[in-house]
Amino acid sequence: MKRYKVAIIGAGPAGYFTAQALNNSADAERGFQIDMFDRLPTPWGLVRSGVAPDHPKIRTVTKVFEKIAAEPNYRYFGNVELGRDIQIADLERAYDVVVLATGTSLGKKLGIPGEELPGVISAADFVPWYNGHPDYASVNPPLEGKYAIVIGAGNVAMDCGRMLALVPHELSSTDIADHALEVFHASSIRDVTIVGRRGPEHAAFTSPELRELPKLEETDVFIRPEQIADAISRVGARIESEKDLRSNLEAMKEIAHAEHRGNERKLSLAFLLTPLEVLGSDRVERVKFAVNRVENDKVVSTDEIVELPCDLLITAIGYKGLEIPGVPNERGRIANVDGKVREGVYVVGWAKRGPSGVIGTNKSDSSEVVKRIVAELPATPKGVGAIDAHINSEKIVTHDGWSAINSVEISAGEALGRPRRKVVSWSELLSLGGAKST
């Protein structure tokens, strides 16, 4: 059997689905040795540090990841960063195929005056903070005011808004980071508004996220009924032919006409507002918006201006990837043609297509790229030496090391009636994982 060596850089969904597709394409004549690298000691990427704590069902995909990791052809190299601990050229020499699944972790900027004021943070910092990512444990978002605004009209914005609007005891049985749960309990935020530049018909929320909102028992949710009625009128017959559009607008209509309980906590969805300026002296106090309208399915601004009170502003308008030395970057993602970067180097997931889709989208995306990889495999594997010689073995967290971390987190969580209690300290993660911070 020909045995090809594959390096997958990034242990998130795209990386694991790539490994799964490679295993599924193996046969009697061709097999794969898969080495997966991640800069963190812990795998699972956004499933661990991006999925909201109150969405535990989404995290069950980790059972698939663990099954892949249990295969004898799999090795995990945690705490190994591309560009720091190992270079792309080293990988290209040592492997027949290199697959980049590095994602996109930098939040895009609004590019408006006042954006640098205290009290303005990116969802790219807020989400990993409450999820226990070790790089973001000290973010400490200010939640002492009453009004929060989240700018964005996708599921990340929805998660941020919902997390701020929930009563903290609703998070006490989740795997939210301890430091975040403490801050949420002390929070005085009571009025949250999620703001989209375009109309309801253009929103990138998924309908399951929207349909959760009326189920919030201690938070009243608001959408102006006329905004939904106008959107339905604008889309016309499209509402019958476009399933996702219909499902979204129906869910928003249900929210708009739902009865309110008079709860202290409020979550609103507002549309057709473009942020112009963040106002405040020493910190954010208000946000100035231009009111928009839709003409021929295009958003155009009007002369009308509104200002909304704001004590915390979270921007959730998209992500871009970190540049990797030796890898071409194009508009915040790795430059590629249908997943191919150059001979022997490929890219999958958000690093390939930008931050779009849900976790399952990465499965089909990775599968398509693997088809191309298999079709373009060299006739004979390189048969070169191991990559281990290029990396300080004392700093590597292996899969056994991750299993030790995982066991400690789950045991600590069970004692508190939670699925896990995340370790958020780099030094503790490395110590539990049997590695040195060298």
Image: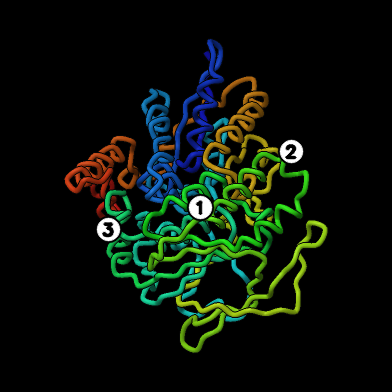
Q: Where is mark 2, residue-wise?
A: 241
For residue 354, side relative to residue 159 (left or right): right
Q: Could you say which quadrant of the image residue 169 lies in? A: bottom left
For residue 81, side relative to residue 2 (left or right): left
Label at residue 178: 3
64 up-or-down from 218: above or below: above
Q: Residue furthest top?
A: 28
Q: How many marks?
A: 3
For residue 58, side relative to residue 186 (left or right): right
Residue 28 or 125: which is nearer the viewer? 125
Give the percent coordinates (x, y) of residue 33.
47, 26
Q: Earlier in the sequence, mark 1 or mark 2?
A: 1
Question: CA gap, disc 1 to disc 2?
Answer: 47 Å
Q: Residue furthest left?
A: 415
* Amino acid type for the residue under numbered disc 2: Ser
Q: Earlier in the sequence, mark 3 or mark 2?
A: 3
**Badge 2 local density, few (<14 within 10 Å), some, or many (20+)?**
few
Q: Residue at x 59, y 68 (%)?
A: 109
Q: Residue at x 38, y 23 (%)?
A: 72
* Amino acid type for the residue under numbered disc 3: Asp
Viewer-side label of 3, 2: 2
Q: Earlier in the sequence, mark 1 or mark 3?
A: 1
Quadrant containing the C terminus in the rendered view? bottom left
Label at residue 83: 1
Q: Could you say which quadrant of the image residue 172 lies in? A: bottom left
Give the percent coordinates (x, y) of residue 264.
38, 68
SS label for mark 3: helix
